[in-house]
Image (tube, rainbow, N blue to C red):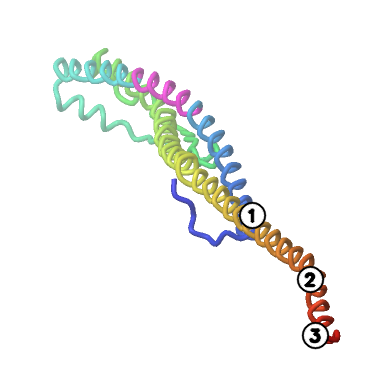
Amino acid sequence: MAHINVPPTRSNLLRMKQELQFAREGYEILDRKREVLTSELIRLAHDAGALQEKVWKLLSAAYLALEQSKLTMGQDRVEWAALAMNQTVDVHLKFRGVMGVPIPQVESRGGPQEMTYSMGDTTATLDEASAAFREVLNHIPELSELMTAVWRLAGELRKTQRRVKALQYIFIPEYEETVLFIKGALEEREREETFRLKWLKTKMTKKAAAKPALEAQNANQEHSIVSPM
């Protein structure tokens, strides 16, 4: 793993240590966030899957009853009965946060009446279809809420996973390698400085030790020059 290209100074060593600490703390926070998102996503996905299966079964039964009513009543009479439905469902959205992810909460108000057409002109299969579609309509807000939550949490989990891996396999190793590089460079510089000081001290010691002998030699030479022949 290559290190970050910075000069090996003590100030950079302190800065790299701080950034390494921040990266490790960020990794721990994101790792906990990943765990919470994963558990919440699994729970919501299970609920969404069960509710979606229920809705599909209701829709299958509703369309089957509708087809049977068309066979017994005819296409035109079924469409005329459907035109009697004039009420709609009001939908209101609120949001809650899950680890910073806005999750919608869908609230529905109102709904179609149970009987909006004449019973004398319709069959029981149309009543079954109408009841099945009303039940489906009651589950749609909850299903849409769960499905949206699953998609949003899954997207956030993917982003969090990428960030965790980037910290774990790229940034943290780079900072660790940089800290080791700067420490090694500073230790090598200290060893060189220590060796240089020792060398200077040894040289000065030898010079100091040789000075009295040199002075004595010079004194002897001067004495031999001035003594009578």
SS at badge 2: helix
Of circles 3 and 2, the one toward us is 3
First along the sequence among labels 3 and 2: 2
Magenta-drawn stretch contains 192: no
Q: Which residue is mark 3?
A: 225
SS at badge 1: helix
Q: Residue furthest front?
A: 229
- Classify 10 Å Cα crowding around label 1: few (below 14), some (14-19), many (20 and above): few
Q: Type of residue at label 3?
A: Ile
28 sits to left or right of 55: right
Q: Which residue is mark 2?
A: 211
Q: Residue 124: percent from the left, percent from the top? A: 26, 12
Q: What residue is drawn where x is 61% and y is 60%?
A: 9
Q: What residue is drawn where x is 61% and y is 55%?
A: 186
Q: Type of residue at label 2?
A: Lys
Asked if 227 appears above or below 123 in the picture, the reply is below
Q: Type of residue at label 1?
A: Arg
The secondary structure making up most of the magenta span is: helix
Q: Residue 76: percent from the left, percent from the top? A: 15, 27
* Span of residues in magenta: 40-54
